[in-house]
Image (cartoon, rainbow, N blue to C red):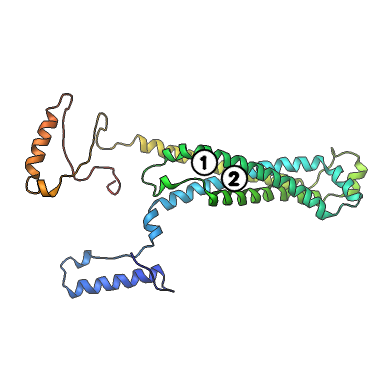
Amino acid sequence: MGRLKPGVTVAQADQEMKVIVASLAKEQRDPNKDQISASVETYLGVMLGDTRTMLVVILGAVVLVLLIACGNIANLLLVRVRDRQRQIAILSALGASRREIIGQLLAESLTLGIAGGLAGRGLAFLCTPAAIRLIPSGIPRALDAGVDLRVVGFAFLMSLASGLVCGIFPTITALRTDLVSTLKAGTSANISVHTWLRSAVIVGQTALGIMLTAGAGLLITSFVNLTNRDKGFNPDHLLTLLFQLPNYQYKDKYPQFYQRYFEKLRSLPGVESAGGSRVLPMTAGNL
């Protein structure tokens, strides 16, 4: 491991390292020089490995769920604002400025967003320990996952952003209402203000819902296929263990020790067969 010089990118260092290794292999006349190579990667990339793509996909699914929830709340707020058109018109007629009306409507949606964020953080504290136990061991630093101040801060910002997203469409609808017609109508039952906003929200909800449902179906199908895939061996009633012999005592006695060891294992009641391997199949790095 090392630090890159200021201004040097990972790609540049990788290219330079390949040139150096190729030159050394050529100078030493190594017969396997065609098989010798080098690469430079960031420490974060090495630590995350192939899990980065999976984590990004999971984050994308979470964002889609959040957008669907925002669409649902925005649609409900649109209906609520439509029922309050006369009240908003009266406030405007009494001298309320647009800024005050916008502040009131956005304050209501932000209150909903913050309340939902607080409830979500409470659930996160309760559910995180159980969720960590479900994370595969191949995920780097999975046991370090938890809810800390950074997570709480990010959730708070997302709650504010969600509140703004939910409140922006109802606010636009309220501001573009013909106040004179609203006051003359005497009721909001016949008011039809920017119905295209509601249609757009509903279309967006439906599109995101279909996309998320299709993605969930594909993930479930892939999981079922992986679960039922032929492993090449029968893992039922199979017991594995790992141990290492001390070199100072068994350095010259490995063959004799393992021969007696497996003979004793096979002679135990209930043992059908026993064998050994340096690397277990389907373990990390040996899939």
Percent position of residue 134, x then y: 42, 38
What kind of element bears circle 2?
helix
Residue drawn 91% across and 41% down?
185
Q: Earlier in the sequence, mark 1 or mark 2?
A: 2
**64 relative position to 53: left or right:** right
Q: Quadrant of the N terminus?
A: bottom left
Residue drawn 36% across and 57% down?
46
Residue drawn 68% across and 48% down?
163
The disc placed on residue 262 is none
Residue 31, by quadrant, is bottom left
In the image, residue 16 sits, relative to residue 146, either above or below, namely below
The residue carrying mark 2 is 66
* Amino acid tagged 1: Ala
Single out the mark in the foreground, 1 or 2: 2
Estimate how packed mark 1 is, as few (under 14), some (14 to 19) or many (20 or more) residues with alpha carbons within 10 Å. few
Residue drawn 78% across and 52% down?
102
The residue carrying mark 1 is 214
Name the residue at the top extreme.
269
Percent position of residue 159, x then y: 63, 48
Name the residue at the front extreme.
248
